[in-house]
Amino acid sequence: MIEMQYNFPLLAGQGAQWRERLRWAVEQLHPEDADELRPTFRMKRMEHREIAAKWLGSRPETTWIVAGGHHGTLVSLLAAQLAGKAIAVETVTYTGIIEQSRMLGATLVGLAYDAEGMLPDGLREACQRQSIAAIYTMPTVHNPLGCVASLARRQAIVAVAREFDLLLLEDDAYGYMEPNAPPSYAVLAPERTFYVRGLSKSYAPATQTGFLVAPERFTAAIESAVKNSTTGTSLVNNIAALSLVADGSVDAVIAAKLVEGARRNAAARAVLGETAAPGPASAWHLWVSVAPRTGAEAQELCEQRGVLLSGAAGFTVPGCVVPQAVRLGLGGETERDRTLNGVALFAEAVHG
């Protein structure tokens, strides 16, 4: 089977690099230090937060280490006390927020979107109709839509958030794919933004290391959420991952992924034409129309031909209309030719 469900890349050599860095991290441990065997939630580890903050351009005091992006989002939901409340999202959004909201009994309010994501007028109208506590969005390389919000769009969303006192949950898992993106919500509205960025997509999920930047007033709640969800993060993984951040290795891997991503993206678009929605040149996923078929039908057709992909149903907010589309991930195969063969098989099966 050709794997086209993963929308993040892994490059040759990363496995060896991670193994060597993990080995080095273990050597940094002190066998006589009992604290290194205890839960890490009690450890401030400001040196780790300083490395993360320098990389993110944030303040160490408002930057926390979490166990990856998924954990960062969950910590944000818990710390902001959003269980049982309404959260505005695009009608098509990341599967993770759908699942986490369901677990916490939060209601997702699906809003219309355009080529830049969530519409400010739609958000305002929703807030006028019902009580909404927060917004969850991915303004830079949305998953699965691939769109990027302009500065004007972000400022308009911030204006509505301030008007109705909404919290902003910004998932920046794929922001590295668009180096020229406008400022994040964490910069535009730091007083109300929970900004999550993990290393899973930009480096590798094996790091189990991510970052959360949030208003200082949520410090106690964030520390409690980390404690009660994981009893802290992995000390060894954090040491290894942050060493890659500190010495520029992660940035070097990102640069290589942008080059390879641009090659795959351009080649895939040459085959798919206008059926693929607009998006950044280096994005590793494409949102593709399969009309008049449904996404589920396209999935089945492609699986019969040996191609695995993701239909729209898994990304659609419950109760909303499921688009006739699929997400093609370009990172599931380490070999570019194999990925492009999958694109060709998809196009032949779905578009004839």
Image: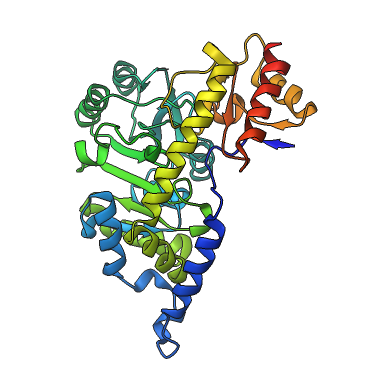
Q: Residue furthest right?
A: 304
Residue at horizontal 26 percent and vertical 37 percent from the top: 185
Residue at horizontal 28 percent and vertical 24 percent from the top: 150
Residue in front for this viewpoint, 150 or 41: 150
Residue in front for this viewpoint, 157 or 152: 152
Q: Residue furthest top?
A: 292
| Vertical position of residue 147 compared to residue 254: above or below | above
Asked if residue 25 can be seen in this view, the reply is yes
For residue 114, what is the image quadrant?
top left
Residue at horizontal 52 percent and vertical 11 percent from the top: 274
Residue 29, image x, y percentages = 42, 81
Where does the C terminus fall, quadrant-wise? top right
Residue 169, image x, y percentages = 34, 40
Where does the N terminus fall, quadrant-wise? top right
Residue 171, image x, y percentages = 39, 40
| Vertical position of residue 195 compared to residue 239: above or below | above
Residue at horizontal 20 percent and vertical 31 percent from the top: 162
Asked if residue 285 can be seen in this view, the reply is no
Residue in front for this viewpoint, 310 or 306: 306
Q: How is the image coloured?
A: rainbow
Q: How many marks?
A: 0
| Vertical position of residue 153 compared to residue 55: above or below | above
Q: Residue furthest bottom?
A: 32
